[in-house]
Amino acid sequence: MGNKISNLKSSLSFTGHRIVHNPDQTRQKVREISLELIQKGVTSFLVGGALGFDAISSEEILKIRQTKSGIGLTVVLPCRFEAFTLKWSGEEKQRLKNIMSGATETVVLQENYTQDCYKKRNQYLADNSGYCVCYYDLAKFKSGTGQAVRMAGRNNLTIINLF
């Protein structure tokens, strides 16, 4: 497991839905808010490794890292890669492998999939961040993204919704 980040205001977690309606526009928003928060001292970015918003956010941070030093990306998997991506296509698995290979660190919270492993991952993100940048449709309250955003709120994170 990864080490707890000591200065939470220097860290940001991303969470969002797997389906992103305007990926190019969302990419641009992720880039803009990330650069703005880097100017405010954020250096550590955490992402849950899922498809959709997580992947878009990760790829944007990897691009930013090419021109800005001192920026870290941690991929937080709820369980080992093979269990997490069991139902993914080969292309989707390769996309996550590419993200993980460019990341500073990959944290695997447990070996096998369990019913609560995503909840544990979401709590880890909330516990290790000062900011939560999300792509959250408020109409999807019962979603995993909704759960992650509520956890962030309970932890008093600054929440920025790009939906």
Image (cartoon, rainbow, N blue to C red):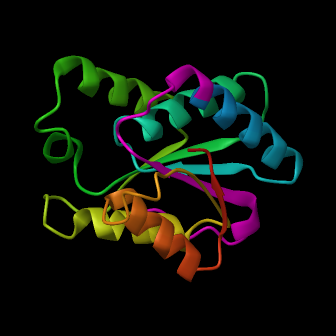
In the image, what residue occupies the spot 11% across and 36% down?
87
Taking 42 as reference, is 145 left or right?
left
Residue 141: which quarter of the image?
bottom left
Q: Position of residue 124 (x, y in %)?
A: 44, 68
Q: Position of residue 142 (x, y in %)?
A: 31, 66
Quadrant for the N terminus in the image: bottom left
In the image, what residue occupies the spot 42% across and 72% down?
123
Most foreground residue, 148 or 109: 148
Quadrant for the C terminus in the image: top right
Magenta residues, as a range? Answer: 1-25
In the image, what residue occupies the spot 54% across and 71% down?
152
In the image, what residue occupies the spot 16% across and 23% down?
89
Most foreground residue, 59 or 105: 59
Q: Position of residue 148 (x, y in %)?
A: 43, 65
Q: Position of residue 93 (x, y in %)?
A: 25, 27
154 vs 58: above or below: below
